[in-house]
């Protein structure tokens, strides 16, 4: 899916937060095993206080919305499309850390935050070497 389209839709959906001083600092796509987007997590930062806010964005009935999709069971973990063939996976706290490790050529994933792993589908990690 076109990255610029995603940025534009995210900006449009967060206009009400922008008026309160928040700006989108990162957009993290949660993909299926084929690399197709399932949903996105938007990281916003307040321009004065650096307070962060995380909001999910998905497509519902053909429209972008600021909400998570309905999951049949548990939520997918980050970067599913990289995990299948990986021999070693790093489990980290947060998408930004996972992205940084991936830029170094490592495979990393997360459930999003330190408190979200219980609601996440960890099955793709079964049988893998995972470093925390």
Image (cartoon, helix red, strand yellow):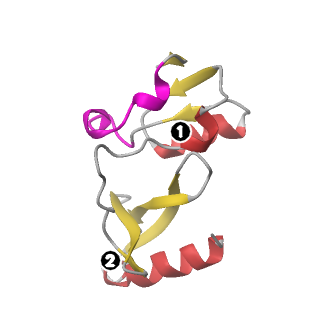
When the figure is inspected, residue 86 is found, relative to residue 45, above or below; the finding is above
17 relative to 91 in the view: left or right: left
44 relative to 70 in the view: left or right: right
| Total count of labels | 2
The residue at 62%/20% (across/down) is 88
On whether residue 119 falls in the magenta region, the answer is yes
**Residue in front for this viewpoint, 119 or 115:** 119
Q: What stretch is highlighted in magenta?
A: 112-126
Where is residue 63, by image quadrant? bottom left
Q: What element carries label 1?
A: helix
Q: Where is residue 7 in the image (x, y as percent from the top left)?
A: 55, 74
Q: Is mark 2 on a helix, strand or loop?
A: helix
Q: Where is residue 122 in the image (x, y as percent from the top left)?
A: 39, 31
Earlier residue among tags 1 and 2: 2
Q: Position of residue 48 (x, y in %)?
A: 37, 67
Q: Which mark is residue 17?
A: 2
When the figure is inspected, residue 129 is found, relative to residue 122, above or below; the finding is above
The residue at 40%/62% (across/down) is 45
Q: Few, some or many C-alpha atoms within 10 Å of disc 1 (few <14, some 14-19, many ≥20)?
A: some
- Asked whether the residues under the numbered discs 1 and 2 touch, taking CB atoms below 8 Å apart as contact, a structural biologist would say no
The residue at 51%/56% (across/down) is 28
Identify residue for label 1: 97
On whether residue 41 falls in the magenta region, the answer is no
Where is residue 98, by image quadrant? top right
**Residue in front for this viewpoint, 96 or 66:** 66
**In whole angstroms, how far apart are the C-alphas of marks 1 and 2?**
25 Å
């Amino acid at each position: 899916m076109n990255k610029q389209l995603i940025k534009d839709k995210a900006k449009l959906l967060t206009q009400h937060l922008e008026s309160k001083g928040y700006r989108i600092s990162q957009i993290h796509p949660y993909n299926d095993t084929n690399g197709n987007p399932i949903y996105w997590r938007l990281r916003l930062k307040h321009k004065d206080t650096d307070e962060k806010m995380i909001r999910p964005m998905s497509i519902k009935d053909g429209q972008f919305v600021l909400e998570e999709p309905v999951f049949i069971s548990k939520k997918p973990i980050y970067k599913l499309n990289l995990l299948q063939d990986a021999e070693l996976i790093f489990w980290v706290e947060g998408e930004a850390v996972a992205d940084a490790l991936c830029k170094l050529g490592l495979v990393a994933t997360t459930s999003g935050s330190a408190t979200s792993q219980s609601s996440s589908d960890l099955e793709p990690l079964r049988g893998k070497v995972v470093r925390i």
